[in-house]
Image (cartoon, rainbow, N blue to C red):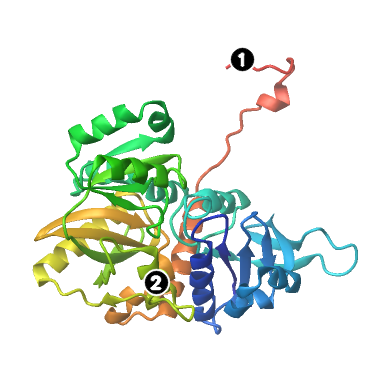
Amino acid sequence: MKPVIGVFFGGNSVEHEVSVISGLQALNNLNKDKYDAVAVYMTRAGEFYAGEAASRIEEYADLPALLKKCERVLPVPANGRADLVYYPPKVLGKKIYATIDAALPVVHGTNVEDGALQGYFRTLGIPFAGCDVLASAAGMDKAVMKTLFCAAGLPVLDAIRVSEAAWRADPDAVLAEAAEKLPMPVIVKPVDLGSSVGITIAREEGALRAALDEAFLFSDAALVEKALVDPREINCAVLGNADEARASECEEPVSGGDILSYEDKYVSGGKGGKGMSGAKRLIPAPIAPELREKIRAYAVSAFAALGCEGVARVDFLLDGDEVFVNEINTIPGSLAFYLFEPDGMKYPELLDELIRLALARERRRARRSTSIDTGILKNYKGGSKLRK
């Protein structure tokens, strides 16, 4: 029998719609001769739905109608696999919609890409593709990510982290710290968001106030970072694990303004359900060969610094010939498959590798002991309180 892969997408994130596009791209590119695939759509309320209709992009124009065509399911552990059981349980007939051997999460943003969904799969005990819990969480928090990059000796731009609580309590103190440490202009980002949502460039104090208020609509912390004047953005993806990782070709996205916006990424060039693969870009990036190799090496180092697995995209900023690591995307839009195509790797082959890496990681985990025989409960005769 062919392995059954559950492709999970959606979730409670501002990048919900983008995840649907990326998820269905992956679903449609899985090798049908090697795998059976199940589309599992996650609503913003955290409900799981499966069904044939969930695999068709046109159905998502009317979500209430889509859900009526699908079955609500609940993943339940099943000896290293997961049963997608009907929920509420059916009184008569089949109790299980499908049983999956591994999960392929194609999700973006908070509550899903940030380790939350990965932790759920880990609790269920089923293999899942991509970064594990810690790397997923670190890759979503821009401040933590930057700290780990610094520790690995990677070049990053100066920044300060601002909590919403500190901003509300004493905005003048926050502005004073920013003025002391960061020259204008600065760029303000929600600390745990992607797809350029909530990001603003501020060139004076009034604009910085407004930018922080904007960022706190989406997150409880913000990153205020030195902004480069007319930088170039270069991206490079990495595929592999701690033992071996390979860098992709480099790309230069085409921006319609000061920053690469959500519209640049997903709207202006992403019509027809193409997502990030349809955005405007130059591949290969028009940079010198020496700079290309430096960026590819930095990308692999950034991947290793966070302990990533699977595929991730590392975004860089160029200030002349000076390179800065901007951020990492642990589940990039369209899984960055288009960055590996110039080297001859097609999307189905990329997905094959992600699944192979997921199963290999699960085999390594299976060799570890998760219990010790202490006899505490067997011999315990005290009351309800334990002394540590």
Decide: few, some or many residues near mark 2? Use Cα within 10 Å; few <14, some 14-19, many ≥20.
many
Q: Which mark is residue 337?
A: none
Check the picture and name the quadrant holding the N terminus: bottom right
Name the residue furthest right. 92
Q: Quadrant of residue 165?
A: top left
Give the percent coordinates (x, y) of residue 32: 55, 83
Check the picture and name the quadrant holding the C terminus: top right
Q: Is residue 340 above or below residue 87?
A: below
Q: Give the camera-side residue of 31 and 148.
A: 148
Q: Give the camera-side residue of 34 and 323.
A: 323
Earlier residue among tags 2 and 1: 2
Give the percent coordinates (x, y) of residue 324: 19, 54
Local secondary structure at mark 2: helix
Q: Which residue is mark 1?
A: 387
At x 45% / y 73%, what residue is drawn? 351
Horizontal relation, residue 345 to residue 205: left or right: right
At x 42% / y 67%, what residue is drawn? 333
Q: CA distance from mark 2 to mark 1?
A: 54 Å
Decide: few, some or many residues near mark 1? Use Cα within 10 Å; few <14, some 14-19, many ≥20.
few
Give the percent coordinates (x, y) of residue 237: 31, 66
Tell me, yes or no, if residue 144 can be seen here.
Answer: no
Kind of residue at disc 1: Arg
Q: Is residue 299 above or below residue 383?
A: below
Q: Is residue 114 above or below residue 72?
A: above
Local secondary structure at mark 1: loop
Which is more foreground, mark 2 or mark 1? 2
Q: Which residue is mark 2?
A: 276
At x 21% / y 35%, what residue is drawn? 179
Give the percent coordinates (x, y) of residue 81: 64, 61
Q: Report the number of discs.
A: 2
Kind of residue at disc 2: Met
